[in-house]
Amino acid sequence: MDSKNEVYIGIDLSNSRTLLSFYKPNMAEPVTVSTVVGSENYAIPTFLAKKKGLGQWFYGDEAKRRVMQSEAVAVEDIYNLSLSKAEITVDGQVYEARELLVVFFKKLFSIPGVSAASEHLKKLVVCVEQVSLEVMELLNFVGSRIGISSDSIMIIDRRESFYYYAYNQKSELFLYDIVLFDYSGSNMVSNYITRNQNTRPQIITIETENHGEIVDKRDATFENILKERFGNKIISSVYLVGDGFDGDWMKTSLAYMCKGRKVYLGQNLYSKGACYSGLVKDGVKEWPFIYIGDNELKLNLSIKILDENELKFLTLIDAGESWYEAKGQCEVIIDGEPDIEFYIQRPESRDAHVEVLELTDMPDRENRTTRLRIEARPVSDKEIEIKITDLGFGEISPATDKTWEHTIALR
């Protein structure tokens, strides 16, 4: 595939609504699609409807309209029901919820502009409220059913998606701290973002606070939240996301926010950030930052090797990778004692902790005639399972397929 035609698609998926953006290398920024030509209402209800008595499906606002006109049967809560692997009865027929989520995704990919772009899909990035093994399994299933391999799918949470969005803006917008207020649900949630410019790469930290539901005197209450959250800190930019900010109720709070800060209101920051994350993960864009969130690995894992008579560190696992997706593998030849030294390092530290795994009951062979496969797979954000397999050395030393297993944990 010509890299000039490669497309990154970002989807912000929730049980109530979905937003979709896509990015091509020749574009200034990702474009968010609307199902209504010329409209900036990008939110597509995560909603299906089946035409009564026929196998025709509708989605989004059209599905809701068809249901109101009594032409179709509604299918709500598709995402949550898919996660629980539920079955749904629609118009007298039983369906697996996750198969209906596949139908919804096929409808999304049929939107004009998206359908053409998806022919050159490089990566689909889906951002959700919270990543889990169930979410990973579900979205990889959906991807496989619409013809997208697991290697071309990424799943991230909304905080990580916004991190990619914020640091892809003009540098003056992240010169100092950044604050995101999300008022998508009943509660207002804020994310305070800082970066440590003294580390390489620069470490990004996000502190989240739930401010609860704002019922009365919204303007005054929000202004008090702002004053408490901002304090005496220097903030470059403030972003507002969610339909809770709709309407003309922000007066004094907006005036306070705008004092020396850039303020942005938008629906589609997460879906755009998802596009940017694909670019960064693929190495298309230079990225001097690292974010260690709930789903990201908190340690670097490497081994020391001799490569063409030069000692080097070979990294098996990088901090900042999603522990759900990360894996590392290499093959080495033992020179000397039958043991492997693993170097464990926090991303913010230059010091490394060393763990030595002794390969007991190793077959008695001449030096440098034992080849090993080393596999590293995280089991949490702070633990990595190591599996070492004896591959032998051709006809000189037949493989025994003996294995050694060990779990490395961050201290």
Image: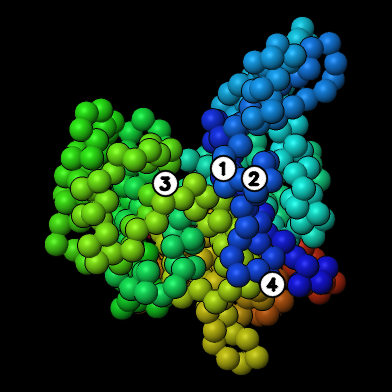
State the CA–CA distance, disc 4 to disc 2.
21 Å
Mark 3, other Cα within 10 Å: few <14 / some 14–19 / many ≥20: many
Kind of residue at badge 1: Asn
Q: Earlier in the sequence, mark 3 or mark 4?
A: 4
Looking at the rendered structure, the secondary structure element under dot 1 is loop
Q: Are marks 3 and 2 in contact (CB under 8 Å)?
A: no
Relative image position of residue 167 (x, y in whole percent): 45, 67
Q: Nearer the viewer, mark 3 or mark 2?
A: 2
| Quarter placement of the N terminus | bottom right
Judge whether residue 370 can be spotted in this image.
yes
Residue that badge 3 annotates: 241
Mark 3 or mark 1, whichever is nearer to me: 1
The quarter of the picture where residue 71 lies is top right
Residue that carries the numbered disc 1 in the rendered image = 41
The colour scheme applied to this rendered structure is: rainbow
Residue annotated with mark 2: 34
Residue 191 lies, with reference to residue 49, above or below; the image says below
What's the distance in space between the residues labelled 3 and 1, CA to CA? 13 Å
Marks 4 & 2, CB-CB < 8 Å contact: no
Mark 3 vs 2, N-terminal side: 2
Q: Residue at x 61, y 45 (%)?
A: 39
